[in-house]
C-alpha cells in the first residue's frame, strides 16, 4: 500500500487549554513519526511525498474566507507584537448574531474556532497544507486505479468544519479528499470515521449533500468531546437527509460492540454504493489512550482492517487521532495490514 507523508507536519507543534491549564498538546510530531517508522518496519509499501496543490483545492470542503483566514492568521497575530501561539478568547455563542466577520485577529480567531485546542503558530499553515496535500495525493492515486492508499496526515482534520478549526484540526483532510474525488468524476463517495471522537467537521461539511455519505462510530457525545455533535438523531438535512449516520457507543466499549457497529456502517456504505471510500483512521479507541475511553486492543485493529477490506471498495485511509504514542504506529498500521490480508 502506498503511503503519502511529509516532514512539513513537524512545523506545527502546539499547546492546548486542558483541565484548566495551558499545556503541551497531545497532538505532537512524534505521533506521525512513530506511524511512519512502523510503515517502514512492516514494509507496507512505498512512501512518497505529497504533490503540491493550490489552496483553491481546499475550497468546496471549506469556504474561501476560512482558507484566507488560515493563510494569514499568524501574520496578523504576530503583527500585534505577540510572540505566543495564537488562541481564541471569545466565541460567538447562542444569542450573539455572529454574522459580521471581525476585522481584528482576536475576533477572527473566535469566529473561526470551536475550542482552545487548535493554536496557530508560524508553521501551522504550511503543516496543514502538507497534510491536506497528502490526502489529495492519495485520492489521486485511488482515482488513477489504486485499490488503497494511506495518507499519513498530520495535523489531523475531522474536527475542522466548513468555517472553523478545532480539536487539533485546521483543514479537513478527509473532506477535501472527498470533494476532490467528486471533482474527478466520482458520483458517490462514502466517508467512514472510526476515530474515538465524532467527526463533527466532516458532518458539518456534507450535512446537506446526498453525494457524500458520512458514517461515524464514536464515543457518546453526552460524555465525550466534541459534546455538541454526534448524536444518533443527526441524519442530515435537505438533500442530505438520510446520508449522515452516527453510531455513538458508551464508555468502556470493547471490540465486540465496536465490530457490530462497524458491520452496521458497512451495510449503510454498501447501500450507498460509493465509487470510493475514505476512512478517517483514528486509533484513539485504544484501551490505553490518554484522552479517550474505549477498550480496543492492538489485535483488534487487524480485524478492523479485514472488515473494511470486505466492503470491496477502493479505499483511502486518512490518519486522524490516537495519542498513546508508543502504540499508535502498531495500531494504525495493523488496520492497514489487516486490510491487505497480512493479519
Image (cartoon, rainbow, N blue to C red):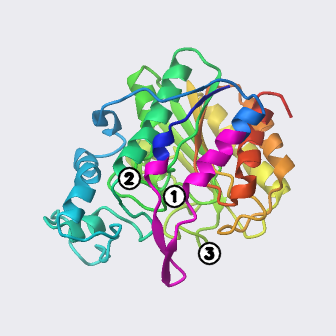
Image quadrant assignment for residue 289:
bottom right
Residue 233 to residue 21: above or below: above
Please indicate whether residue 293 sits to the left or right of residue 306 in the image: left
Q: Which tag, 1 or 2, sits closer to the chain's start?
A: 2
Q: Residue at x 78, y 41 (%)?
A: 334
Q: Which residue is identified by label 1?
A: 234
Residue 119 image position (x, y, % from top left) = 39, 64
Q: Secondary structure at mark 1?
A: loop
Q: What range is drawn magenta here?
A: 10-37
Magenta span contains residue 32: yes
Residue 38 image position (x, y, % from top left) = 73, 40
Q: Counting other residues with Cα less than 10 Å from the Cα at mark 3, is it few (<14), some (14-19), or many (20 or more)?
A: few
Disc 1 vs disc 2: Cβ atoms closer than 8 Å? Answer: no
Q: Counting other residues with Cα less than 10 Å from the Cα at mark 2, is it few (<14), some (14-19), or many (20 or more)?
A: many
Q: CA distance from mark 1 to mark 2?
A: 32 Å
Residue 223: numbered disc: 3
Residue farthest along the top direction in this orientation: 145
Total marks drawn?
A: 3
Q: Which residue is identified by label 2?
A: 124
Viewer-nearest residue: 100 or 70: 70
Amino acid at each position: 500500500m502506498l503511503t503519502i507523508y511529509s516532514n512539513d507536519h513537524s512545523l506545527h507543534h502546539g499547546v492546548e487549554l486542558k483541565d484548566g491549564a495551558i499545556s503541551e498538546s497531545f497532538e505532537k510530531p512524534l505521533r506521525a513519526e512513530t506511524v511512519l517508522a512502523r510503515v517502514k518496519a512492516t514494509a507496507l509499501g512505498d512512501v512518497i511525498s505529497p504533490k503540491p496543490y493550490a489552496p483553491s483545492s481546499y475550497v468546496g470542503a471549506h469556504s474561501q474566507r476560512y482558507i484566507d483566514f488560515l493563510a494569514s492568521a499568524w501574520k496578523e497575530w504576530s503583527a500585534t507584537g505577540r510572540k505566543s501561539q495564537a488562541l481564541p478568547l471569545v466565541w460567538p455563542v447562542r444569542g450573539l448574531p455572529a454574522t459580521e466577520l471581525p476585522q481584528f485577529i482576536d475576533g477572527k480567531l473566535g469566529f473561526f474556532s470551536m475550542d482552545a485546542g487548535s493554536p496557530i503558530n508560524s508553521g501551522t499553515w504550511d503543516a496543514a497544507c502538507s497534510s491536506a496535500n497528502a490526502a489529495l495525493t492519495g485520492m489521486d492515486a485511488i482515482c488513477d486505479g489504486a485499490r488503497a492508499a494511506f495518507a499519513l496526515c498530520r495535523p489531523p482534520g475531522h474536527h475542522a468544519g466548513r468555517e472553523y478549526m478545532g480539536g487539533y484540526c485546521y483543514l479537513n483532510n478527509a473532506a477535501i479528499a472527498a470533494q476532490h474525488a467528486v471533482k474527478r468524476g466520482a458520483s458517490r463517495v462514502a466517508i467512514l470515521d472510526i476515530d474515538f471522537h465524532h467527526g463533527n467537521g466532516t458532518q458539518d461539511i456534507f450535512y446537506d449533500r446526498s453525494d457524500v455519505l458520512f458514517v461515524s462510530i464514536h464515543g457518546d457525545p453526552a460524555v465525550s468531546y466534541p459534546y455538541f455533535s454526534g448524536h444518533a438523531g443527526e441524519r442530515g438535512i435537505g438533500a442530505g437527509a438520510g446520508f449522515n449516520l452516527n453510531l455513538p457507543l458508551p464508555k468502556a466499549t470493547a471490540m465486540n460492540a465496536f465490530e457490530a457497529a462497524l458491520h452496521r456502517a458497512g451495510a449503510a456504505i454498501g447501500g450507498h454504493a460509493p465509487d470510493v471510500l475514505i476512512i478517517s483512521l483514528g486509533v484513539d479507541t485504544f484501551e490505553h489512550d490518554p484522552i479517550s475511553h474505549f477498550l480496543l486492543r492492538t489485535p483488534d485493529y487487524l480485524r478492523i482492517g479485514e472488515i473494511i477490506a470486505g466492503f470491496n471498495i477502493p479505499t483511502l485511509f486518512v490518519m486522524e487521532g490516537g495519542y498513546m504514542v508508543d502504540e499508535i504506529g502498531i495500531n494504525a498500521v495493523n488496520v492497514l495490514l489487516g486490510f491487505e490480508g497480512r493479519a
